[in-house]
Image: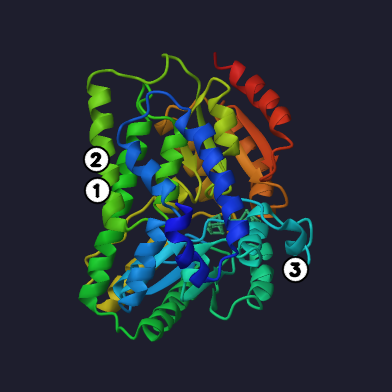
Amino acid sequence: MSSEYESMWKELGLNLDAHDALLGVLGKGYTDIYLAQKERPEGMGYFDFVMSEVHGLRIKELVDEKAQGRKIIGSYCVFVPEEIALAANATLVGLCSGADFVVDQVEKYLPRNTCALIKSAFGFKLGQVCPYLETADMVVGENTCDGKKKAYESLGTLMDNLYVMDLPQMKSVQGRDLLRHEYDRFKTAVEELTGVAITHDSLKQAIGIVNAKRSALHRLAKLRSSDPVVISGLDGLLANQVSFYDNPARFTESVHKMCDELDERILTNQGILPEKTPRILISGCPMAVPNWKLPWIIETSGAVIVGEESCVGERGNRNLTRDTGATIDELMDAITDRYFQVDCAIFTPNQDRLDHIEEMAKDYQADGVIHYGLQFCQPYTMEAIGVENALEKKDIPCLRIETDYGMEDVGQLKTRIEAFIEQFK
Ligand code: BJ8
């Protein structure tokens, strides 16, 4: 891929040596973790291709879109509505933040005890290795946890196109009003960026595109609940990860195509794993590309992951948006209602999340839940205790893991995870 896209990367201002090193690590990780799996659905070929071209063809598509006058918006959080971007003729891409990079430089901006996800966002910027970030005409940060909120103050000094969205912390009437107000403010900012006024029709159409994408992911999630298991958790996670930066219509079609194949597997009773393989639900912090460490450990320890209660997973794509509003205002209300249901751990209290985890454990026939908290992430590591207590009351075993993006703790994690899984055999 290198030579073909080198001039494009150079023009985007990437540090080519550092970028080559990142692609090398990414490629090796993908081969060792993904391509080493057995009996993968043929439909995963599409996602393998997307991953192999993640910094190549997809970036070229975005660069071509820009040449035709379309704007690119990068986002760090599932609270940024793709519907509004699409309605104003812009493309929204998720900025992944799933790997450590230039940590020494990052720690000149952030305290050492900052979560790996935030550090990664800085590392990708300071190391000049993320073509998505460099392609973006606007980068949206959001006031969620304290770490992100304060980090955007520093990140804003490293880029001139950072837009910060405020977010509520409570599911109150005032909280919803704030969200609605912030979505109106975002709509205006996006219209100014693109020079395109959002209409009722364009917003309704955008809602349809995003709903279709989420429906495809719901179909995949439902298929993952089947017994016997027809797709690995690693592959299920990958589809969710790719949903953040692929073209939405093409992504939707590819997920459905793979789901047709999985339907066939169920009909013909072709499980990929022996019956009674322990089934695990993951819950907690988002897992962005290429953060595959924990799922890889779980699935090489004799269990299968049947779902993710995560923003890269069901928390992020759970509900659809009503598209019946007769005015822009009503559609904006519907968007607000949909996103206001996202039960991120930054909300207090957050009983909805506890209920949802229990519900998922039941729906996906999970034997146990592994709660994944990034080290130094206060919202999720604190909430993990409540999650464990709530699950215990329902006799659902739960293992709390705290980790980062480093590989030093792999051996220790494997020992704990194997012991946890053993009880389900
Ligand atoms: S809606 S989960 S994508 S904020 S891991 S940076 S919480 S200290 S990522 Fe998130 Fe939006 Fe919520 Fe979802 Fe802070 Fe924790 Fe780090 Fe986190």
Give the percent coordinates (x, y) of residue 265.
27, 24
Look at the image and tell me whether residue 174 can be seen. no
Q: Residue at x 66, y 78 (%)?
A: 157
Q: Is mark 2 within 8 Å of ligand 1?
A: no
The amino acid sitting under disc 3 is Tyr
Left or right: 378 with respect to 291?
right
Q: Which residue is mark 1?
A: 253
Q: Residue at x 71, y 47 (%)?
A: 375
10 Å crowding of disc 3: few (<14), some (14-19), many (20+): few
* Visual colour scheme: rainbow
**In whole angstroms, how far apart are the C-alphas of marks 3 and 1?**
42 Å
Camera-side residue of 308 and 292: 292
Q: Ligand 1 falls in which quarter?
A: bottom right
The furthest residue to the front: 3
The amino acid sitting under disc 1 is Glu
User: Where 310 sits versus 324, above or below?
Assistant: above
User: Where 257 sits versus 298, above or below?
Assistant: below
Give the percent coordinates (x, y) of residue 309.
49, 43
Mark toward the start of the polypeptide (3 vs 1): 3
10 Å crowding of disc 1: few (<14), some (14-19), many (20+): some
Marker disc for residue 109: 3
Q: Which residue is mark 2?
A: 257
Left or right: 94 with respect to 251?
right
Q: Mark 1–mark 2 contact, CB under 8 Å?
A: yes
